[in-house]
Image (tube, helix red, strand yellow):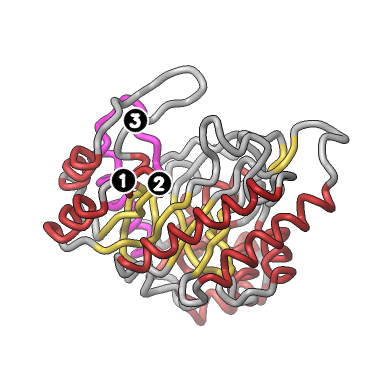
Amino acid sequence: MNKLAVITGFLGEVRNRYMQYQSDRVLQDKFAVADRIEGLDGLELCYPGDFGDMDLLRALLDERGWGIAAVNYRSRRTGQWLRGSFTSADPNERQALVDDCRRAMDLAAELGCHRITTCPLNEGHDYPFEADYRDLYRYAEETFAAVCAHNPDVRICIEYKWNDPRARCLLGGAGETLAFCQAVDAPNLGVTLDVGHALYGRERPAQSAAMLARANRLFYVHLNDNDRCWDWDMIPGAYHLWEFVEFFYYLCELGYTDDWYGYDVFAKEHDTAETFSTSFAITRKLERLAERLDRDTVAELTAARNPARSLLYLYDLLP
């Protein structure tokens, strides 16, 4: 069974373009919120924010015995790397990014975590003729290759997203992110499949997982939901019940069964701990529903490709 972790960035201040919904919290207060989450196994720490005081971070983790699902490397920084970090046209900025990411890898390894996940949101473009796409890919390949070479035992996971804050992110979908990883050709470079980003990008999450796993690049999973119109970071299952059941069914088939789920769910004005406790409880219910699927029956139904029969079988599983 996969373990459940919350991204610490969602335990403090959360805001959109218009409103702030939660107050900013220091690290100790974020851990205090996490203490109230039912079913929590660990955290996805955020770099650099959570790493200002390593002694304090270690003490907070040791007190609770929590695991670390991943370290979330934030490559977009206010007042820094405004034109991209992995793809900056300035070689000094790219080198600064590489050096900083290597430091994050070292700190993660010190804590016993061998996975860095990063969502390169600010790598991309807003307008036609704004950037030379060939340069963007070349710079990204060079920087990711340099980062991966620093420690082959630490997996680097690219979390793709179609847009935001760029009108078009450089790595917007599962397929193009997989192609990019294959171009870099580093065995420790793979993909974080964020279900919400997949849905927003008009993907079928189970299909994306199958494609990535075939290439041995499915490195990590984030869970949240949305209405496919925007990346709302909602409770899993709020909109896409059967897509989640199919996703969990295929994760089991693909062998992603003894790892971690990271949650980026936006609590807005509601109680943060209650929101994540509900997210965890619904995840386990969806997993149990997926476990009720008979493998032989599913194989027959997918071979027949008759949606009338398939949907009736699925709904017969419900009480």
Which one is nearer the viewer's eye here, 99 or 23? 99
Q: Is mark 3 on a helix, strand or loop?
A: loop
In the picture shown, does residue 264 fall above or below 283? Answer: above
Q: What residue type is labelled 3?
A: Glu
User: In the displayed image of the protein, which residue is found farthest to the bottom?
Assistant: 296
In 3D space, how far apart are the residues under numbered discs 3 and 2 (Cα atoms)? 16 Å
Q: How crowded is the residue under tag 3: few (<14 C-alpha within 10 Å), some, or many (20+)?
A: some
Residue under the point 70% across and 69% down: 184
User: Closer to the camera: disc 3 or disc 1?
Assistant: 1
Q: How crowded is the residue under tag 1: few (<14 C-alpha within 10 Å), some, or many (20+)?
A: few
Quarter location, residue 19: top left
User: Closer to the camera: disc 3 or disc 2?
Assistant: 2
Residue under the point 73% across and 55% down: 139
Dots 3 and 1: beta carbons under 8 Å? no
In the displayed structure image, the side of residue 67 where residue 59 appears, left or right: left
Dots 2 and 1: beta carbons under 8 Å? yes
User: In the displayed image of the protein, which residue is found farthest to the top?
Assistant: 18
In the picture shown, does residue 41 fall above or below 18? Answer: below
For disc 2, the marked residue is 48
Residue under the point 43% across and 47% down: 237
Q: Quadrant of the N terminus?
A: bottom left
In the picture shown, does residue 218 fall above or below 89? Answer: below
Confirm whether the magenta stretch covers residue 268.
yes
Sequence-earlier tag: 3 or 1: 3
For disc 1, the marked residue is 52
Image mark for residue 13? 3
Which contiguous range is marked in magenta?
264-288
In 3D space, how far apart are the residues under numbered discs 2 and 1 (Cα atoms)? 7 Å
Q: What residue type is labelled 1?
A: Gly
In 3D space, how far apart are the residues under numbered discs 3 and 1 (Cα atoms)? 17 Å
